[in-house]
Amino acid sequence: MNMLKTKLSTIVLILCCWYTSSRAQSDVRAPPSVHAPLFARTQYFNKGVNFTVSCNATGTPQPEYTWQKDGANITSDYINFNATTGFLWVESATIREQGRYRCLATNTWGTALSQEIHMSMISGERFDDVNARSMTKVAGESASMECLNPPESVPTGTFAWYLTDAKDKQVSFSPTKRHGVDERGTLHFAYVEVDDDIPAKLYACGVHNAQANNIYLGSKVDLTVAPGSDTDDSKPRLLYKSGPKKGFIGKSVTLECFFGGKPVPEINWFDKYNKVILPDNARFKIQYHGRRVKILNVTDYDEGEYTCEASNSQGKLKEINFLNVTSRPMWVEPPLSQTVVEGSNVTFDCISKGADRENTPSPPIWYQNGEQLPHNDKRIINFTKFRLLHVSRDMDIMNVQCLVQNEFGSIFKDAYLNILTPITIGSRPSPVVRVVHGDVKTLSVSAVTDPSRTLAFRWTLNSKDIRQSRPGISLRSNDTHSSITINTTDLNPMDLDTVLGLYACVISHDVQHVVVSVDVMRMPPTTDPSTTEVQPVTEGIIEAASTSMWWVLAVVLGLLLVVGSIVLIVFVLRHRYPKRVYLLEKKELKNKLDPMRDLENDYFQTL
């Protein structure tokens, strides 16, 4: 029988533990958080092929996924996605699938939005022209062959020039110090030579689409070079420069200068402070025989005038290129995900800026769980802050989003607010504990917190960590309870002070910490023997005074009881015999009046 009871008790205990654990686990809450895609990007696809896009988010409960295209929920039957995995795919894609895609992850506590992915279909066209144009130069002269009407290319193509024959067999035409291709696709010769006139060969502009791995040729030129004087040198002259150019913060930008002249001019570049840019400068890269300077990782400070100087034996020539630094909005303080305890005040920032000397970005647009909020929402402060006071775990767990735009682009950020049950102290020792040598005292602290967090307990004595048990002090801890035992029995009486002082138990997790303090002090010494005779008298007086007070209280209560009884009796009599009972007033008694007798003798007249 006892064995059966033991087994039943064990089963009940296991079920209770399982129920408690399951209930705690079921109360874990976490809004969604998208981990991929984390950055806005452009992704290219070929017509007629399949493409896929993945989305990954976490949250409790596990989020479900939906997708938007160009800001609208996807409902078409030719774009598919899995609501459980977040995977999106398109079969035999066409131009209609081109657009801006965004993933939404939703659970009980909120909706998170991913960054946008721009799906763009790879395309490239051929040149319209079919006939070559003629160009005649004299040896020693400069020449520029424009790439006329280059075709559209997605993504943007790069330019190169080729030598082709009648059957369009092309041979690459590598740039040299004497000739090269600028950013518009024009081929420049500092000066031409007779050998540049190649029989049965045409110069052709090529547009290379790296994604499609295609080269489209066109804008062909039939070059004829007439002999000239090999000794006629010429001073530098400008063939092309970048002119005013935009550079975007954080990106690279290239400035170019092409010069003609004989001999080929040497080119040097000077920065905005008119200092020469040396080849070993880490912020600049000199390319293509000095014709190009590439500024890496552009900043606001790079805006200004850059000078290219060409020189040869015949003279010098300077040209100025102005760089205008601009940018889409840049984050100063983006909204950041936060986990706080219930009752806290929370602020999400959405502060951005543009490039120096540029227009200020438009006011931020705020969203809650993917739904746009009106600008007059009382939680929005000066457009740039979203503030929540005394947050509630049942009402305020959410996702917030912020969008900022200017003429050059936009930035977007998703952040979540998760709210935890605060740490609650279940038991704690007295604020002051006194000990004498030979005592064993246990300071015990228990606490609970949000089911998603595990508590850590740390003890200190006089602000110094107690990391492990030591003479006179032993530690014990688990997830909800921690105790420290002060055992002075084995200590030398002279070492008692080593276990005295201010003990503090720090209960914490990654979001919150609570401190419980206990002052452990030495017991005061015994009272001086010379005063022991007086002590009992004092105690007797106090006891007698206490007894007298009890008697006084008893008498007062008795009097109140008697008065109450009399009042009750009179009240009952007056209601039971209203016509027979008449209480005479003092004046009636003094004048020997008897109203009852007067009534019987009919002394009162009836009106």
Image (cartoon, helix red, strand yellow):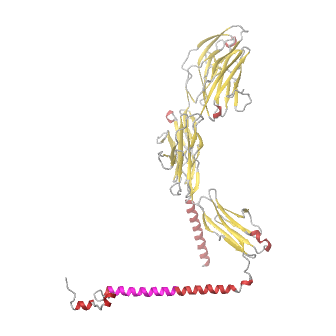
Q: Which residues are magenta?
A: 553-574
Q: Residue at x 70, y 73 (%)?
A: 434
The vertical placement of 362 against 398, above or below, is above
Please check the rendered image and state whether residue 196 is part of the magenta-colored stretch, yes or no: no
In the foreground, 325 or 522: 522
Q: Name the side, left or right, on which 326 lies relative to 439.
A: left
Q: Position of residue 229 (x, y in %)?
A: 71, 7
In the foreground, 360 or 559: 559
> Which quadrant of the structure image shows residue 186?
top right
Q: Position of residue 107 (x, y in %)?
A: 52, 52
* Residue 184 seen in the current view: yes
> Which quadrant of the structure image shows residue 488?
bottom right
The vertical placement of 70 against 561, above or below, is above
Quarter of the figure with the C terminus: bottom left
Q: Name the side, left or right, on which 567 lies relative to 533.
A: left
The vertical placement of 554 against 120, above or below, is below
The vertical placement of 42 against 432, above or below, is above
Q: Residue at x 64, y 58 (%)?
A: 509
In the foreground, 120 or 186: 186
> Which quadrant of the structure image shows residue 50?
top right
Q: Name the side, left or right, on which 261 lies relative to 337.
A: right
Q: Residue at x 75, y 76 (%)?
A: 438
Q: Position of residue 36 (x, y in %)?
A: 59, 44
Q: Position of residue 262 (x, y in %)?
A: 71, 14
Please check the rendered image and state whether residue 560 is part of the magenta-colored stretch, yes or no: yes
Q: Magenta-highlighted stretch: main secondary structure? A: helix
Q: Name the side, left or right, on which 76 lies relative to 455.
A: left
Number of labels in the image equals 0
* Residue 298 seen in the current view: no
Quarter of the figure with the N terminus: bottom right
